[in-house]
Amino acid sequence: MAGPVPNARSRRIEESATLAITARAAAMKRRGLDVVSLGAGEPDFPTPGPIAAAGIRAIEQGKTRYTAAAGLPELRTAGADWLRATFGLDHGPAEVMVCAGAKAALHMALDATVEPGDRVLILAPYWVSYPALVTMADGVPVVVPPVPERGFVHDADTIAAAARQHGARGLILNYPNNPSGAVPTRAQLQAIVDAARAHDLWLLSDEIYGSLLYDGAEHVSPATLPGGRERTMVVSGFTKSHTMTGWRTSFLAAPQAVIDACSRIQSQVLGNPCTISQEAMLEACRTPLPAEHAARMQAFGERRAFLLEALAGVPGLALEPPRGAFYALVDARELGRRRGLDDVAMAEQLLERHLLAVVPGSAFAIPGFLRLSYAVSMPELQQAVTRLRDFAEAR
Ligand SMILES: Cc1ncc(COP(=O)(O)O)c(C=O)c1O
């Protein structure tokens, strides 16, 4: 008798490149090698005390049972309030649901809206999971090439042309962007929303880095712009800002029909997001931690400033200031040309010969670049730059 065999769709799904490189670096560390890993997109700070304490309290108080599929009703209400206060979204509790992480929210949203064969535009450089998530929803990902010369913010006309050319139904946006740190101006984003309206595209806006901004950059959700609300599904939460990475929580805010559909799907595939984590998220919504946030932003800001200055002195590398998130997307095309290596080979040599883990730009559809996460301590970052310089200057 033949055993179960992975189907064609699952065979089209590749492993997340960032998780793969992080796992490889961790395995090398376990072998005793002194690897510095700038691979993972996970802050090095712990989950803030009051939020962790709320999780512990939930267990102690026996809040460990099933919840409604879309999440605790009080959390949906608190989430709607938090999204309004923080990002100016105008969604009621019935238009907000709780998901098990931003990744799961993206999956739910795509699963509930993509028809088989729908073309979905993904702007490069993109977060590694978008094409796989579209494929899993039986859609067809269409990658729009990157525009480093425009600070990685696509022109609305380019998006409109791609929508026409491919007959696209949807567009995934991610600002602040992973990996580039790009944040469009309000006017640039409005032009993209206008293009989406003109071509009847829905928008899936991944705003998981929405409160990690530098140099006065402003986060604007397309759902708050004229013509945006009715066509936008917003993914938000505390994963990156509050290091709730392992808690697996997020919000999806969207028109109620979509939320109802996602809730039905979630009721079948998950039941509900972890009850204990929902209690912790409730605390995060109700108790803003401005001092904690300011301290984090100061630390990220110092690391970012250090990288910008230090990399300017490394031959063959260039870095434009990222405006959000905690990644540096380094232009290594010149170095690659000099050394006769592509970005994958450079990342390989950096790891094997210099014990430095970075993610090759190819993983984000921007070959020739390298992504460095600066969500690591300053001493690690200093060591990383030394190793990068050794690599760049090696004969
Ligand atoms: C742009 C983006 N979206 C979503 C996620 C996933 O977030 P979560 O851990 O909440 O699923 C990540 C994590 O790296 C990300 O960078």
Image: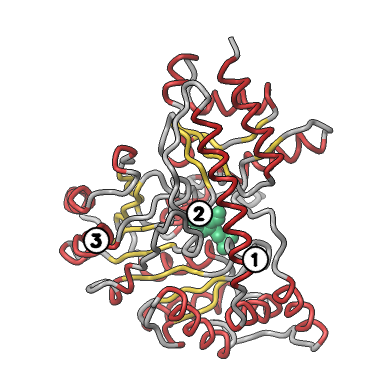
What is the spatial separation of the Cα atoms under label 3 and label 1, in whole angstroms? 32 Å
Counting from the top left corner in percent of width and height, residue 100 is at 59, 70
Q: Amino acid at mark 3?
A: Ala
Disc 1 CB within 8 Å of nearest ligand 1 atom: yes
**Secondary structure at numbered mark 1:** loop
Q: Earlier in the sequence, mark 1 or mark 2?
A: 1
Residue 125 position by quadrant: top left
Asked if one can make out residue 287 in the rendered structure from this viewpoint, the answer is yes
**Residue shown at 55% from the left, 71% from the top:** 250
Q: Amino acid at mark 2?
A: Ala
Counting from the top left corner in percent of width and height, residue 218 is at 39, 62
Q: Nearer the viewer, residue 152 or 186?
A: 186
**Residue shown at 62% from the left, 26% from the top:** 350
Q: Is residue 313 left or right of residue 222?
A: right
**Secondary structure at numbered mark 2:** loop
Q: Label 2, on which residue?
A: 325
Disc 3 CB within 8 Å of nearest ligand 1 atom: no
Q: Label 3, on which residue?
A: 187
Q: Label 1, on which residue?
A: 244
**Residue shown at 49% from the left, 27% from the top:** 343
Counting from the top left corner in percent of width and height, residue 75 is at 57, 85
Quadrant of ligand 1 in image: bottom right
Residue 199 position by quadrant: bottom left
60 w.r.t. 179: above or below: below
